[in-house]
Amino acid sequence: MTDGISRRTFLGTVIGGGVMIPLLTGCGPLVPASGIPGSISVHTQLSGAVSGAQVFSDVVAAYSRTTDRAVALLKNGSDLPIVFETSSLAGKEADIAMVNLQGRTLSWTRLGATIPVEDLLDDWGLRDKIIPEALEEWTDEDGHLRAFPFTRTNWPVSFNTGLLAEAGVELPTTSDELILVADALRSKGIGPVTVGGSDWSGQKLFLQILQGFLTKDEATRAFSTGKLSEFPGAVAGVEHFVELRDAGVFVDNVQGYTSDSELTQFNTRKAAIVPAMSSALALVPAERAAEVTVGGWPTPSQGGVVDHPTVIQSYNGHGIWISANGAEKLELLKPFIQNLYSPEVTSEFILGSGRDMNRITDVVSTDFPLVAQASQLTTDQVTPVMLPDLLIPDAVFEPMIRVTAMAYGSASADQIIDRFEQAYDAA
Amino acid sequence: MTVLEVSPTTGRPVSARPPGARPRRSPLRERFPGLALPALIWYAVFMIGPVVAIFVIAFLRWPGMLETPSFAGLDNFSVVFADATFWAALGNSAVQIVVGLPIMIVLAFLLAFYVVQKPRGHRVLRYILFIPALISAPATAMVFYAMLNPDGLVNGLLAPLGLAGNAWLADPSTALGAIIAVELWSGIGYSAVLIAARLDGVDTEIVQAARVDGASDWRIAWRMYWPIARDFVGVVTMLQFLSLLFNSAQTVLLLTQGGPGTSTMTLSYLIYSKAFVETDLGYSQAVGVVLFVLGLLGMWLIRRTLRATH
Amino acid sequence: MASRTVLPLRDRLGSLTSGTLAWLYAAILLIPFYYFISSSFKTNEEIFESPLALPTSWDLSNFATAFRQADLGLAIANSALTTVSALVLTLLLALPAAFALARAQGRLGKVIENVFNLGFLIPAFAALFPTFLLAAAVGLFHTRTFVVLLLPATALPLSIVILTAFMRTIPRELEEAASMDGASTLQVLRQVYLPICIPGIATVLLLNFLSFWNAYLYPLILIGPDTAQRTIQVALPTLKVDAGTDYGVLMAGTLLTLLPVYLVYTVLQKQMQKALVSGAVKG
C-alpha cells in the first residue's frame, strides 16, 4: 500500500468532486419536490415500518402519475409534531400534515399553525363520506373541525392463547382471573402483561384501567381537570392498578419498556398479553396471529362500573391537517385529499394494510385477521371506553407520561394521585 | 512584531516599502492577513453568532416554537436552578464524567502502553482499536439498542451465567451505566490509538535499558512513559471530556431520550430536549450557558492536573 | 521483532494480564460487530433465540427492506453530496486562511489565529437552536445547502491549525525565490505552498470526511425529514419504530451505513490513523 496519495489523483479527485456537485444536485430524486411549481408537500406519520406506510406511498405515487403533479413526502414518526412546529417557525412547514390528535397537535388550530376545515368539508363534498362520530371527535369546543379524520384505531388487548394453554389457563375476563393467569404464566417463565411503561402506550393502559371505575361523564371531567382525588372512581381505579401491579400482572421492569419493546416481546412469545393499537396488530407475523385472540382489558372483580372487558375506541388515528402554507394552495390540495377519500383508496388501506378508516365503508380486512377480529368485537363482548388524548392539555401530556412511568414502578396509590394532580397544576 | 529590513548595501535599517511596490511582498499584506477574511467571516457567522445567541436567548421568555419571545431577565436561570430535572441532569453528567473519563483515560493509557511494546499481533490490535472511531453515533446507538434489548445479545451472553434478565436501558438503575458503557466502548479504543502514537515517539533504547535493569512493566509505564506523554494525554483527556459533556446527547437521544424518568437526562440532552421536545427555549439556552461555563471550568481543571511538570 | 530479555515471572504475569486485558477489550470491540453483521441475515426470532449463532441462510431480504423503508439509496447519495461539497468548501476557506496566517507578521495575525484556536471550546450542540434560527432567517431551513455551508465552519479551527502548521514549515527562501521570479501571491500559494502541503491537506480531508459523513444531530434538525435531501445518518434511526422494530432490518441498515466509511478506512487506513493523530497533536 502506498504511503501517500499521488498528487495528480489527489487534485483530480478534488476538482472532479467540485464539478460533479452542481450536476448531482440537479439529479431527479435528489431534488426537493418543494422546488417544483404546482407541487404540494405532505408531512406524514404513515412512514417507515408503520402499517399503511407502503400503501400510502403507492397511493401518492399513483396520484402523482395520473395527475402529473409532484408530491413531496416528508416522513417522521412520533416526532412529527415537533418537526412540523420547527418548520412552522421557519415558515417552511409542509402543506399537509398527517398526524393524530394528541399533545402538541391539540393547540395547532388555536395557534394558527393549521386552518379549520369545516367549510371545506361541504365544499369538497366530504361530509357524507366520513363517519359522523369521527367528525364530532375531531371538532374542537369552538365548533372548528381541526382536520379531516382519516384513519382510526381501537386498542384491544391481544392474548396469546398458545402461551396461555402452555400455562394451563384460559383467557381472563375479570381482574381476579387476570391475577391467577399472571401467576400461572410466571411459573412457566412467560411474561404476563407487557406494555410500554415508559411511554404513551403505558399511559393509555393506565387511563384505561381507571375508566373501569368511571362513567364516561366522570372520566371526561377527571381527565380534563386532573383532579383524581375528587372522583372516588378514579381513586379506586388507581388503587386497583397498584393492586394488579403488585400482584405481578406486569412483566418485570415494565416501567422502562417502550411500545417498541412491548410489541417485540409479544411477537417473539416472551409475553402473553399486550394492549396495543389495531394498526400494530397488522404487523404481527402470521404464525403468531394464528394463536392470538383479541379481547378487552379484564373488568375489575370488585367495584367496577363496566359490564365487559374494556377496549379503547377512538376515531383519532391520522387526520389530514392543512397548514398555513397549505391554505394558499387549496385548489391544489382539493383533488389530492378527495382522492384519499375515494372508495378505491379506502379499500386499498383496509385490504392492503389492515388500517381502520374513518371513511364510511363496508370493506373488512381479510389478510389481517387480528385487525378484523378487533373491528368486529361487539358491545356484547367488550365495553368501549374513550381515548383521553383529546382531554389532556398539551402541556400536561409529557409530564403525565413521567407520572405513569413512575406508577409502573413502585409508587403507592397516594403518591401516584398526588403527582398526577401536580402534573396538571404545573402546566 | 514588525520586520526591520536591513539594507544589504549600507547595513542600515530601511523603512518599509509602500504597498504596490514590486516584486517584494508588501508589508501591509503581511500585517493584515486578508486571505483569512473569508474564513473569519464564515466562522463568525456560523460559529460565533450562534454561541452569542445562546446567551441572548437565555434571557428571553420563549415558551413555544409558535409563541413570540419576550424579555425575561434572570427568570430562566431561577427556574432552571429550582428545577429538579436540572439537578438530576447535573448529577448524571457529573457521574458520566467523574466515572467515565478517568476509566477511559487510564485504560486507554494502559492499552496504548501495551500496544507500543509491540507484542504479537500488535498491528492487528491497532487496526481493531481504531474501528469505533469510524462509526457514527447513530450506527453505534442502533447496534447497542439491539444488544441491550431485554432479549438481545448482552442478556443472551449472560444467561448461561445466570446474570441475565435485566432491561438495561429500561431499568433506572442501569440505564445511565449503559449509556456510559456505550461511550467507553467507542472512546477507549480511539484514545488508545492517539496515545499510542505519542508513545511511539519514546526512544525504545531507553526502555530496553530499563528492562535490562529489571524494571517491571508497571514501573516502565508509570515512571517512564507517563511523564513524557502526560501533556499529550492531557490533550486527549480534554477532547474526550468535551465529547462526553456535549456529544453524548446524541447517544441519549437515540437510546433513552433521558428516561426512564430522569435517570439518563444529561445536561447536553436537557438542552436539546427543552428546545426541540418541550420547546421551552429560554430554559434550554439558559442551561446552554451553564454548560458552556462548566465546559470551560472542566478544561481548565484538566489542564492544571495534567500539565507537563517541567 | 526486537529481541527481549526474559523477565522474572512476576513481570511476565504483568505482561500476561495486560495482554489478556488488551485482547479482552479487542473482543469487546469485535463481538458487537459480529453480532450486528450476523443479525442482518436473521429474523427477529432468530436474533433473540440464538444471538451468537451464524445465520441459517444468507438471505439478503433484510437489506432490501432496509433500503426500501428508509430510502437508503437517496440517503447515501445525499451524504456523499453534502460531504464532498463541504470538504471542497472547507479547503477553499482554510487554505488561503492558513496561507495568510502562516505568513502574517503583525499582532492581528496572532489574534486571528487564537480566535480559531478557541473554536475547540465552543459547545457544539448547545448552539443547535440558534443555528436553526439562523437557517430560518436566511430561508435555508430544511435544505442540504445550509448544512453544506455550516459544516466547514465547524471544521475551520482544526483545519486551519493543521494547515498553518504545515505552511509554517516552508522556508522563506523558497517563497522569496518564487516572487523574485515575478510570481503573484496566488501563484506563490499554488506553486510553492500547495505541493508541499499535500500531506496536510490529505490529513484535513480525511479527518473532516469522517466528521462530516458521521454528522447526525445538526443534519437531523436542519435538513429534516425530506427523503430527497436527508443524509444516511438521519435515515438510519428511522428503522427503529414504535410499532415493533425489526432488528434484522435495523442491523442490515446499520451495515449499509457503515460500508462506505469502512471501505475508505481499509484503503486509506494508515493515512487515517496518521491524520487523527496529527489532528490531536495539533489540537
Image: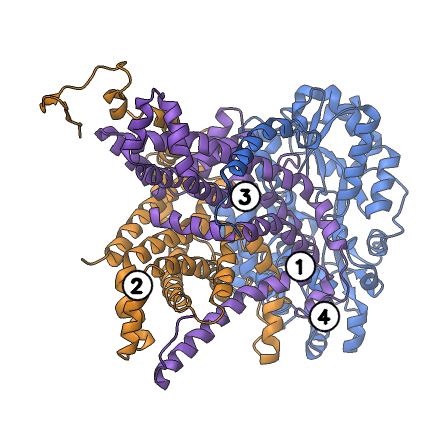
Chain colours: A blue, B orange, C purple
In space, the residues marked 2 and 4 are separated at their CA atoms by 73 Å
Q: Earlier in the sequence, mark 1 or mark 4?
A: 4
What residue would you read off at disc 3? C213
Element under disc 3? helix
Badge 3: chain ID: C
With respect to residue A89, does A49 lie above or below? below
In space, the residues marked 1 and 3 are separated at their CA atoms by 48 Å
What residue would you read off at disc 2? B203
Badge 1: chain ID: A
The amino acid type found where label 3 is placed reads: Trp
Q: Are marks 2 and 4 in contact (CB under 8 Å)?
A: no
* Residue B45 in sight in this render: no
Badge 4: chain ID: A
Q: Position of residue B223 (x, y in %)?
A: 26, 69
Element under disc 2? loop
What residue would you read off at disc 1? A209
Q: Quadrant of residue C27?
A: bottom right
For image coordinates 9% across by 25% down, the residue present is: B11
Badge 2: chain ID: B
